Image (spheres, helix red, strand yellow):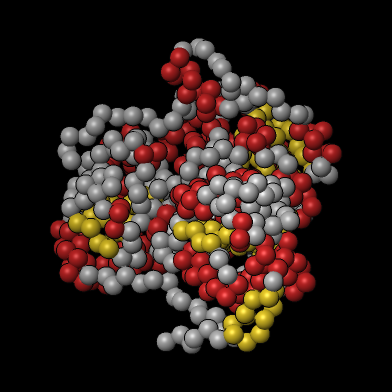
Amino acid sequence: MSKPIVAKEEVSGGEVVARILEQFGVTTAFGVISIHNDPMLEAFERRKRIRFVPARGEAGATNMADGYARTNKSLGVVVTSTGPGAGNAAGALTEALTAGTPLLHLTGQIDARDVDHGRGMNHETADQLSMLKAVSKAAFRVRSSSELARVITEAVTCALDLPSGPVSVEIPIDIQMKPAPMPSYVPRNGKRRVEVDSKAVDYLVALLRAARRPLLWAGGGARHCGAEIERLLSRGVGLVTSVHGRAVTAEDHPLTLGALNNGNAAEEFYRTCDLTIVAGSRLRGTETSVHRLALPSPLAQIDLDLRAWNRNYASDLFVLGDSAEVLANLADRLPADWRPDPKFASDFAAAKRNAVAEMRKAIGPYAEISDMLREAMPRDAIFVRDVTVSANTWGNRLFPMYQNQGSIHALGGGIGQGVQQAIGACFAAKNRKVVALCGDGGLALNIGELATAVQENVDLLIILMNDGGYGVIRNIVKSRYGDRRFYSELFLPDLMNYARVMNMQAWRVGTLEEFRNTISQAMAATGPRLLEVDMNGIGAFPEAFAGPRLRPTPTAR
């Protein structure tokens, strides 16, 4: 049982925040300083136990905290101003919410007595708390100095509690500045544990025992289940992942398709399977041809969130619980004499070869770009992808992943978030290389954050696939309106000159041979650097990517 919170001394509210974060093990935070958050940041600077990374905007700072948390398997922290500052963070908070990233968003507020009274105070925003609730797992407002420690502790616990997510806290500036009680002990509540129904696991074991060609679909909610999944792979269960669930095990394992889950070869193979176990995945539309992809039946679902039950696909069995615990139970209870179909492994390997060949045919010369990048990149490197044609094709699916927590991408589809996520990942990389794949449209959206990368001297290689505009949107418009083009062509400054102004190393390549001759040098260098790939020089994709292909609605389920 936790000790009660007992006031030991009074310090400023800003210092209370700093000390509680320190007790939770926070060592890095991101944000933008403001007149409505400087008491917290003053405490960070004075105590020198939390490194604060000053971004150029709140959206970038929040994406950095997101990338940091995903890489470090720990809490990400971002500090923003109130009003417009908190609003700027909303899109990045939405991404963190979609990805289930444990993130604490600390935002200032005007004086407590003035909140929500419409007095026209600087940075005042009507009903800001409702906005934050819409883009966060939860949102709190500190209403008095006496409750500050409790609210921050509750917010951190809520962010880390599974299913994790971003939590926002408003702290009025007067509460940050005036004395507040600092507790002598901060309760460290563990992650909530849902008691797994042993009878439900019995049913799941029965389904697997009856199957001979079983498929496990692992999503982002199973990213921590590598050991449990490897046990099932060793018994002959096949694995496919969502893009967010990638690298839960090394993708060169013979019984994993990785995220090659949405093509004709995969779907043909699924027809030969006789069970789907879905662990921690929403079976999102982009992964399933907008829920038209036919999955093997019966279908069992494991999730901590009861709302996931039958959300997108009807399930024959729903098991409420942490995927790691349920999968461990499943592996423990699977009889020693259970064996898959003797042909399943060879058929799986053939399906994987066909899926790879299908993707390589669709992307033409960019398959060689993927190969050369993979050869140059260390096996344990962190690969961050923004929303761009290359990311949505070879980056998210063909490019092999080996290291758990080495795969980060903009899950919610927001453009221009990848570079900032990669900057955040650099602070948690622990000597691992970080590579960001982005497009010219995404870079243009937050190009100012390159200054953050330079100021902090992060070891980051940005591979910019430059096709002169919003390539994905251009292809979608063409598929809908023929040869018309509108609003997708973009001006971008000469990036070689821009990089020189920013004191960044930079290279530009326009052929496969130039990429081959440059990528190893760019990878081996250190500090922030940019490799621009002229896609007009490389050539067009044989099949234009315009979003997931739609299929007829399956009739089997």
Decide if residue 408 is in sight here. Answer: no
Name the residue rendered at 24%, 32% in the picture.
Answer: 553
Instruction: Return the x and y of residue 154 as percentages of the image width and height.
Output: 49, 70
Q: On the picture, is 188 further left or further right than 198?
A: right
Query: What is the x, y in percent for residue 4?
Result: 49, 86
**Quadrant of the drawing holding the N terminus:** bottom left
Q: Which quadrant of the figure has residue 78?
A: bottom right
Q: Is residue 17 visible?
A: yes
Q: Residue at x 32, y 70 (%)?
A: 194
**Residue 358 falls in which quadrant of the image?**
top left
Residue plotted at (46% across, 76% down) = 189
Q: In this rendering, is residue 187 above or below 501?
A: below
| In front of the other: 236 or 425 | 425
The quadrant of the rendering that contains the C terminus is top left
Left or right of 273, for residue 166 = right
Quarter holding residue 332? bottom left
Q: Is residue 507 above or below residue 171?
A: above
Q: Nearer the viewer, residue 154 or 291?
A: 154
